[in-house]
Amino acid sequence: MLRWLPGRGTRRVSRDIWRNGDVLSAAVLVALGVYIATEAGNWVYYSDDGPGPAFFPVWYGIAMVVLSLVLLVTTVVRLRQGGEQAAAEAPDWEGIRRALITWAAFAVCALLMKWLGFMIAFAMLAFFIITYVFRQPPVMAGVAAVATALGFYLVFPLALSVALPTGVFGF
Amino acid sequence: MDVLNGLLHGFSVALQPANLFWCFVGCFLGTVVGILPGLGPAATIALLLPLTFKMDPAGGIIMLAGIYYGAKYGGSTTSILLNIPGESSSVVTCIDGHAMAKNGRAGPALGIAAIASFIAGSVGILLLTLMAPPVAAFALQFSSPEYFALMCLGLALVVLLSGPSLIKGLLSLLLGLWLTSIGTDLFSAQARFIFGQSELLGGMDFVVVAIGVFAIAEVLASIDAGDKARMLPVPKGLRNLLPSWEELKACRFAFINGSLTGFVIGILPGAGAAISSFIAYGIEKAFSKHPEKFGQGVPEGVAAPEGANNADSGGALVPLLTLGIPGGGTTAIMLSALVLWGVRPGPLLMTESPDVFWGLVASMYIGNVVLLILNLPLVPLFAQILRTPVHILFPIILGISLVGAYGVSGRLFDVALLVGFGLLGYIMVKLRYPTAPLILGFVLGDAMERALRQSLTMSQGDLTILVRGWISATMLICAVLILLLPLMGRFNKARVQAIAEGG
Amino acid sequence: MIGSWTPGLAALALVIAAVPAQAQQFKPTRTIEFVVHGGPGSGNDVFARQLSTIIDQEKLSPVRVQVVNKPGGGSTSASNYMASKKNDPHVIACFTNIWLIDPLVQQAAVNRLQDMSPIARLVVEPALVVVLADSPYKTLGQFIDAAKASPGKLRWSGGSIMSRENTVRQLLMQKTGARWQFISFPSGGERLAALLGGHVEMMIVDPSEAGEQIRAGKFRAIAQVSARRLPGFPDIPTIQEAGFDIPDVPQMRGVVGAAGMSDATVAFYEDMFLKASQTPLWKKFVEESQLDGEFVRAKDLKPFLNSFEATLRDILKDAGVKVVR
């Protein structure tokens, strides 16, 4: 049992613990579970007409709290046993940054669609991804972006009469 | 009219040139609609409905049914190639289908999907032909406790979908249960977890969640992994574009499993094709000799769910045609089409409108052959899509996802949800939470809660109603066994290890 | 094509000329959006598509009437959409009871039907109270006596708690003091299956759906939910005739325009739908679906909606639903 106790570098280990994805996500899920169960607490649990709207959420909310606590505790214990090992799997921040920027561009595209319509917003997204994420020459990216946007227009609204979001320009 | 005479009569109706033509049109449209997300069979049928008023009812229903089952053939295409589930019934196909595509086996995966669809689709119709009335009587025995047990059985599959960490799989499942309860509660009109957004009153659509968590997350994860300007491998030569004999042989059991599971679950009005495909996948993995390979691209993992969702079409027509009970959105609109044509769907349809009933059944045999002929040559063509350089392919995937999400109900709100679920899926991938259980919880959670509350309302709070019937009791025991087996396996392993270490 | 259009247009010109001169005539200039709160294939969708097909075939509108589906949240997606199209004379919607009920029970549903521009009520849908053919209950009275004898044991399948099935049950339970359970099922198919399988004892169902089951000898109708007896069921008493004096709960469908429509615009649409409702095609549809096709004009519709909303509010309160407005 003694070897479980932290020896040197206790502080670093505890900081690393909070950097660990499992610990963080488990903590978030504990909070979500508490939220679900308390929110459900405002509703009817059981009435003359049978189980109410709170009946089911209360139970899966509690299950979520319990399971995420188990995950939290086991991970912390595991990290304390082998803190050095865990630190070795450093995430590739460069890749994560690239993915998150792509996601942000996607989100901006979805937002702009309200005003610019699908065609323009999508062409902008495509241009951004091709040039920024994949580092392709802008001319080629521009051609590809316009071509794919037109392709979507041909297939969906034109050939299949599926409506796409339109903006202030009317397309 | 006995079955053989009925069927012969049906073929004489279905083989009339006009009806053959409508059958082909329906199958073709269905395939197109299935391939493209954002267009569902229900919406297509609704659009075409006014055009069919002037048609003969037999020709009309033959065409509409073609759209219905044809869409299930096409649904696997985007799942396999792009990890975009076009229909709710093809979500499970993403798991092993897209993995096969990433291994350079996109062609075989598409081929197996088509073949499994053909076999199971045909078996489904055969069962519909031979035993529709007794099977319909069986379906009526399913009450809320049975549905609850079925959903428990489905949720127990989380064990098989979880990967290395069962606890993370369970958490992902619970997240799915929560997401599916967002919206207005059917029983009490209570708005749950809507954060003041009236758009959420109707809940979130399955397709939006699935596309976000699968397709968008996949694109983000690939970009993260630095797959720059790379192409997915597509080996040359026809031999590599169609399934090999070994792959087909590996699917023997999956074809049978998919056919039977899909048909049996299809006849239940309260279940659906998505549920049958999940359960068929679960059965396939549970009985496999190499369950650990599932998820890395095994052909059985494509054949079982694809077969199931096609056999489901045959099953779903049983209550519709013999009892006048529609099982889901698409069959409901086919029912209203029949009414508009002046055909009365109900228990007497089979005897009073034999042209419609037997013509439809016979046309479905033909339709499945048509679909196979239509789809197999397309396989090499579609597989070429993956030759597109990644820097073009990824924006296209994002674009198709946007169209698909918007197509659900024409709201930008769904597009915003898609963006959110894309991020959630990516975070889950990064933190090694399996995403399939989330979808499983989302599909089954709502039906499970309903069935449980219906049961307890029926019995006035008496829990024993859940195990009183033999069907529900059996299913619940199976669910418990599925949940416990891996735990026991793990316990054994741990004990063996402890003994070894201690020794 | 041009040849076949011309007489239609000429007739239309005549029709427009025949309308009494108003300050400003309205004439649609682009495609009319006909918003439906259900998905493709829902009852409302089929209803609206039937109407738009008739308008198209009889050339009652100079422009196309296109059905637009805005499903989600009962009627809220559709009514939110209508609110976003305020003052647009080219957007109309097909409403049902749920458009009145959602704002009553959902805090987040803020768009009231009366604040838009009601145009016409087209049909009222009657319903039948049915039991299995081999059920011991021959009349509604016998069912209620049995429910009194064993409270909470008998079961009734239906839709959501806000549906007419539950409203009628609540009214009957209050009137008689009997109590039985209401089992909610989201789809009509499941409700039917529950009764056919004997998992519930009774249900309220559309006559078109029930008619086939009755003809096949599976169901027996014991009462009808309607102000007067349906032509197809002359021997079945209405609930009131069966001796239960509860208010009638009509299930209606009609047309409403986006908020801010001028009187002339409303008059145009009212006229268009009045003509549509007089076509043989529509009459056939109404007859086959066993609907009550009484046309209610815009000027009578608004007061009706207000009083009906008040009735619904009371009924829902009594049913134990939390009313927020």
Image (cartoon, helix red, strand yellow):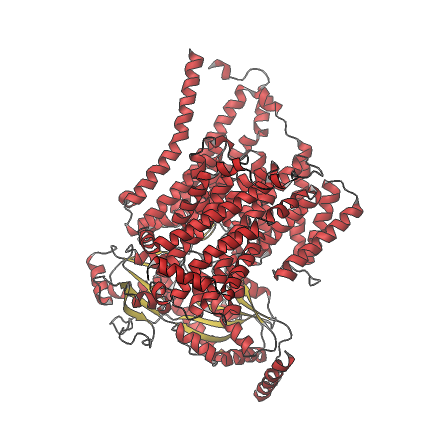
Picture quadrant of residue B411: bottom right
- Position above or below: B398 against C73: above
Task: Name the spot of residue B466 as percent of width and height, x first.
Answer: 30, 44
- Position above or below: C9 against B184: below
Is residue B325 visible in the rendered image? The answer is no
Is residue C177 visible in the rendered image? The answer is yes
Comparing B127 with A47, the one in front is B127
Comparing C268 with B225, the one in front is B225
Comparing C223 with B236, the one in front is B236
Q: Is residue A168 left or right of residue B419?
A: right
Task: Name the spot of residue A74 as percent of width and height, x first.
Answer: 48, 26
Q: Is residue A91 left or right of residue C109?
A: right
- Specify the quadrant that holds the C terminus of chain C: bottom left
Picture quadrant of residue B287: top left
**Point 45% across, 72% down: residue:** C305
Task: Name the spot of residue B421 as percent of width and height, x first.
Answer: 57, 45
**Point 55% across, 54% down: residue:** B31
- Specify the quadrant that holds the N terminus of chain C: bottom right
- Position above or below: A31 against B71: above
- Work out which residue is located at the far left of the displayed protein and give it: C149
